[in-house]
Amino acid sequence: MNTMPINHVDLKALIMAPTKYISRPVPTISLHDFDSRIDSITAQLIDAAEKVGFFTIVDHGIPRTMVDHMFDQSVRFFNQSDHVKAQVPFSAQYNAGWEKNAQIRLSTGAADHKESYQMQFGAGMDGLWLSEDSLPGFQDSALSFMRALQSVSEKLLTCFARGLGFEDDYFVTAHDVRRPESQTVCRLLHYFETPRVPNTTGEIFHRAGAHVDWGFLTLLFQKAGQSGLEICPGRDVSTSFGYGDAWTKIEPDIEKNAIVCNVGELLMFWSDDRFKSTLHRVKAPCDPEDYYGERYSIAFFNQPCRDAKIQGPAKKYPLVTGEEFTRNAMTRNYKALQDKLKSDEVASKEPQLEGGAAAVSAQA
Ligand SMILES: O=C(O)CCC(=O)C(=O)O
Ligand SMILES: [Fe+2]
């Protein structure tokens, strides 16, 4: 939810300036012996959500072989020709499907150089899976992986409910992926290799422009060596674009099979702003030490069911449904982007603002 007005600064110049980094501990939280340690895990999660908005979880029970298998499936998917992938185009209505170079971020006013494919659990995916003939076994593998992520997510949702003083199953029920109202999304991401030679046009090859996620909680897998994810630390910058601020790298930790988690705007809202959604990006490579190769990542966005009733324990904000929250976020971002494009005079064509992941700063 990018609620703050856009800073009218020369973003391009700031993006091209050498990035300032600070090191900042991003908590690592183990889920081992979850049932007997739930209170201690809850305390750690709450602390991380309040102070950083980003944390990693380990000992979550998803074997690395399963993660690697899903990355292999992702490579298989993206290796299909564009013509084939275009058979399952991104649908704004269902927030699912494939997009390429279509997600324009509010922070950059330009499209990310990437392609992504979003999958859901239910009927919203009708017609949005490639056929078994084109990609045998893909759908089964993806759904098994998504179910595994859902079960890890449910542990975290239970802790967040307990930490906020709700019944333990409160968030789990609101995010029930077996229901047709489910909006939870798994997103495969593929960023293209970036040329190392400085380009004469000055075009910046954004990977994922700075944004905050608007869902509840995002779980992200990275691949060994394919770095680039960065967060802009500090609570104060969580709702503005913070260019020029100091960033912190979140390197892939494959040895520990870590899942990177971040609080989305919805959890911030639902906690009456107690938990902070944090600005992050996949950096446009520009410094010599940056990673310029192609990058694959997998994000799982916990989203509430359309009919979930959303209001924090202190009722700081009026109650909204899951559907309204999503629609409001998209409308606000859509409008903000249009204003930005107008003011930047870069609106040479109508941006592709389908909503959801391929929309402005959506799911992303
Ligand atoms: O690819 C990544 O590492 C991050 C992706 C991301 O932030 C998003 O899709 O919301
Ligand atoms: Fe994100």
Image (spheres, grey):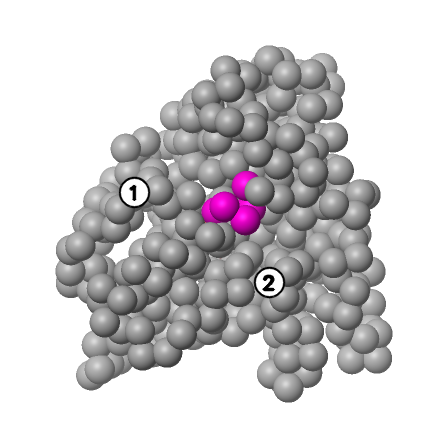
| Residue 311: % across, % down | 56, 25
For residue 297, which quarter of the picture? bottom right
Q: Considering the whole magenta stretch, tell me its main secondary structure.
A: helix
Let me know if residue 307 appears in the view. Answer: yes
Residue at point 70%, 66% (across, down): 73
| Residue 162: % across, % down | 62, 17
Q: Which residue is mark 2?
A: 92
For residue 257, which quarter of the picture? top right
Q: Amino acid at mark 2?
A: Ala
Q: Amino acid at mark 1?
A: Met
**Closest to the observer, 130 or 199:** 130
Q: Which residues are magenta?
A: 325-329
Is 39 within the magenta? no
Q: CA distance from mark 2 to mark 1?
A: 25 Å
Q: Which mark is residue 4?
A: 1
- Is 150 above or below relative to 292? above
Where's the N terminus, which quadrant?
top left
